[in-house]
Amino acid sequence: VPPARAVSVPPRRLAPEADSATPAVEGVVAAITRLADDGRLAEAVQAGEAASIGPEATAELFALLGTSYAALGDATRAERCYRRALYLDPEYVESLMHLALLLEAGGSAADAARLRARARRTSAREPGGSA
């Protein structure tokens, strides 16, 4: 029996490097933002949902989707998107504030107040934020 040969296997990357994905992600978010800004909300939502299953699935993308759904009057999907954004980035102030508005409109004033307080704390920690 011949001796076993060592096989070199390159290490598997679990996630793409942030620097290599950033331009593509920013391009997708910018394109969806343009659609929404042009009032083409249904197209923005369709493009955003398609992007949400790839590397573009960032807190910024989900916040944009939430805003688009809210503009279309779909509070349930908007809330889901804001919560997904906060799952990816618990300190994403835009999603904290938009979700607070949705919850307050839905009658959850205490939950909305907690989210606003969290947003204030996060903003105070950011450079240029007020203490």
Image: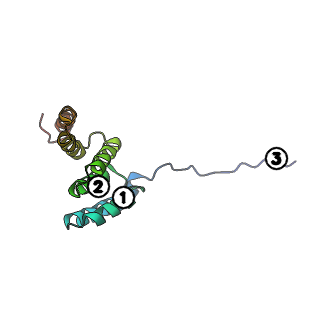
Dividing the picture into quadrants, the one containing residue 32 is bottom left
* Mark identifier at residue 49: 1
Query: How far apart are the two marked residues, 1 and 3, measured between alpha carbons?
Result: 53 Å
Q: What residue type is labelled 3?
A: Pro
**Of label 2 and label 1, which has the lower sequence position?**
1
Q: How many marks?
A: 3
The reply to whether discs 2 and 1 touch (Cβ–Cβ < 8 Å) is: yes
The reply to whether discs 1 and 3 touch (Cβ–Cβ < 8 Å) is: no
Q: In which quarter of the image is the C terminus?
A: top left
Seen from this angle, which residue lies furthest front? 107
Query: How far apart are the two marked residues, 2 and 3, measured between alpha carbons?
Result: 58 Å
Dividing the picture into quadrants, the one containing residue 35 is bottom left
**Of label 2 and label 3, which has the lower sequence position?**
3
What SS does tag 3 mark?
Answer: loop
Q: Is residue 123 left or right of residue 21?
A: left
Say which of 120 and 128 sits in front. Answer: 120
What SS does tag 1 mark?
Answer: helix
Q: What residue type is labelled 2?
A: Leu
Q: How crowded is mark 3: few (under 14 residues within 10 Å), some or many (20 or more)?
A: few
Q: Residues within 10 Å of mark 2 (few under 14, many from 20)?
A: many
Report the residue marked by disc 3.
Answer: 3
Q: Residue drawn at (82%, 47%), measured in percent from left and top?
A: 3
Q: In this view, does 17 lie to the left or right of 40?
A: right
Seen from this angle, which residue lies furthest right? 1
Query: How far apart are the two marked residues, 2 and 1, measured between alpha carbons?
Result: 8 Å
Q: Residue drawn at (35%, 44%), measured in percent from left and top?
A: 88
Q: Residue drawn at (39%, 52%), measured in percent from left and top?
A: 18
